[in-house]
Image (cartoon, grey):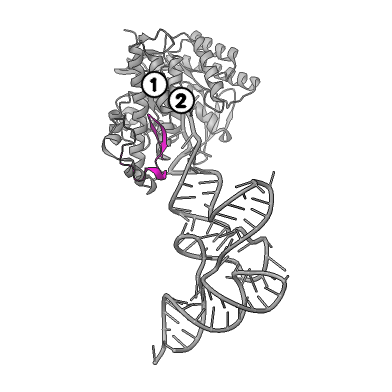
Amino acid sequence: MKWFNILKTDKNNRSIITEISIRHKKIHTPVFMPVATQGSVKAVSSHDIKEIGAECILSNTYHLYLRPGVDIIKKMGGLGKFMNFDGAILTDSGGFQVYSLSNLRKITENGVHFSSHIDGSKHFFTPEKVIDYQYYINSDLWTHLDVCVENPAEYSVAKEALEKTKNWAKRSIEYFKKITAHMEEKPKIFAIIQGSVYKDLRKQSIDYAIELGFDGFALGGLSVGESKNEMYDTLQMIMENIPHDRPVYFMGLGDPIDIWMATKYGVDMYDCVLPTRNARNGQALTSKGKIYIKNSQYKNDQSPLDNECSCYTCKNYTRAYLSHLYKSGELLSHRLLSIHNLSFLINQTKIMKKAIEEGKFEEAFKKFLDKYGSNK
RNA sequence: GGUUGGGUGGCAGAGCGGUCAAAUGCAACGGUCUGUAAAACCGUCGGGCUUCGCCCUACGUAGGUUCGAAUCCUACCCCAACCA
């Protein structure tokens, strides 16, 4: 049986629903994957994650390597057992930390030298080591070490980053094949597509990923400084050049409008810190747009965060209470807002699936925008 | 009743002749966040305007000294501690 199955495509655009089967777990796309950087979707328990309906979460090799250490995770039976989550787990390679911790690292041909953001200690990541670490973490979907550059990037800078990324991709998949050869239930590995906003570079990146035989495409180097229009243009160009015979994952996308848009272009998978981070910072996503729960207008508001939402938070608590919790610095506000925001995004993907199923994606998208508002 | 120390913006609390519409913190108000170094960060915060500046009202109250007072003097009103 194939592990990646296309269930339905919309006639008028590239939106698509698929089913991914990975090591006895199923992922239905389009899918939103909550981010559990350090083996925890911040503020929510694994029980909450399941209840929210997340089929897959994303964790981070770099962070788990530094703390608690991948050896400990291995000893605990892998990350799923460690954090008591039985859904699928995708791990980011640490490539994003190459970008976000740019002042703490040095890239060489062979890998990346890091100073730990925790204690300053020195570490060296190679493509092979990162594969090893994911083996210890025992995630289901792996990514290779890549070089992510901030936008806007000079062509030469983007090209150089891509060259390294390609080189590392090759080393990664070769080592991946070796290390997973004995495994009965093999994980899958995604290529990270780089190339900034440059068409020839992106094309080259895609072609090379196909040539090397990666299991999926992870679109990197987007939503890292470029304008929305540039991002959409680049995405469209990428999607026109990508064969959809394997999953396409847009790394780090979480704005609801962006997810709708990317799904229209054919993307299957998303992850983002936005719903959880913004929840902790007092912002709730609703079908009528985002709201700041601390704003004075909500302190007397007896309605739920979102009338159209049936998450645990919306079923049980008022905006007035959430406003009070947030302003009082009560930790419960983080949990309740995180549960809601994650539920909101996952619910959006459900709406998308249904619409694609019925061949009405465009209408559903328009309906969403009409209510949500097209202002960011 | 006496002595001493105080009364500063919503609160706490600096300032003790001009650079003060008044530090700082909190509160309040608004915003940012896209493969998490984030329960973080950024604005605004006396009023009014023709708003990269100007005008008005303000540091308990009322007078006074001074070119100039939140800052010095006098009286009064409060508050705190101590002494009768």
Q: Nearer the viewer, mark 1 or mark 2?
A: 1
State the image coordinates of residue A246 (x, y, percent, origin top left).
Answer: 42, 11
Residue indicated by mark 1: A367
Alpha carbons under labels 1 and 2: distance apart: 21 Å
Magenta span of residues: A282-303
Residue A367 versus residue A215 in the image, above or below: below
Viewer-nearest residue: A179 or A58: A58
* Circle 1 crowding by C-alpha within 10 Å: few under 14, some 14–19, many from 20: few
Quarter holding the N terminus of chain A is: top left
Q: Quadrant of residue B68?
A: bottom right
Task: Give residue A253's mark.
Answer: 2
Q: Residue shown at 37%/42% (left/top)?
A: A298
Residue B25 versus residue A58 in the image, above or below: below
Q: Residue shown at 54%/17% (left/top)?
A: A233
Viewer-nearest residue: A373 or A201: A373
Instruction: Say whether mark 2 and mark 1 are on the same chain.
Output: yes
Q: Secondary structure at mark 1?
A: helix
Viewer-nearest residue: A263 or A186: A263
